[in-house]
Image (cartoon, grey):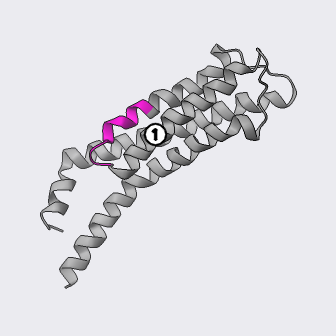
Amino acid sequence: MERAASKISTNDRLLREERLPAAVVLVVGVWLVIAPFALDYSRTFAGIGGYWNDIVSGTIVTLVALCCFIAPRVASWLGLIDVAAGFWLIVAPFVLGYPASGHRDFARANDVFAGIVIALFSVISVVVSHRRRRDGAYRSVSRGRP
């Protein structure tokens, strides 16, 4: 009975360590989709780049993070897409020329901050998953070894 409890707790611990970074990325991805409406991005020509960039990038990040959250062992390398999206969000305000006047500066700060969080937690997710695969942590848990 005690051995079964340790198997469950080991498996739960492994899943928690993999899913936590994906959950953070998922929340930030959903925020990116909502941000253009919540922060009232300008829909003028000057602000349209940030508006659509956040919606498209947020959708991609959310879908990939959802796959990594649901099936972390199968979709571990999909996290690299989120890493790339995170780096894109960091440079996008400067490449797309987000307006920097008044309240619209929130769009720039929001994308840079979200990009840093997404890139950081996606790298953590990919590295943890890769190390588990390399060390055989998945096989030992599935075979019932502590």
Element assignment for label 1: helix
Q: Is residue 121 left or right of residue 55?
A: left
Which quarter of the rendered picture does the C terminus lie within? bottom left
Q: Is residue 86 left or right of residue 112?
A: left
Return the residue at label 1: 63
> Looking at the image, which residue sits at the far left?
143
Q: Is residue 145 left or right of residue 72?
A: left
Q: Residue 96's x, y, as percent?
A: 66, 15
Q: Is residue 77 above or below residue 129?
A: above
Q: Which residues are magenta?
A: 72-81
Q: Residue at x 12, y 63 (%)?
A: 143
Front in this rendered view, residue 62 or 95: 62
Q: Can residue 115 be found in the magenta stretch?
A: no
Q: Residue at x 22, y 71 (%)?
A: 7
Q: Is residue 114 above or below residue 140?
A: above
Q: Amino acid at mark 1?
A: Leu
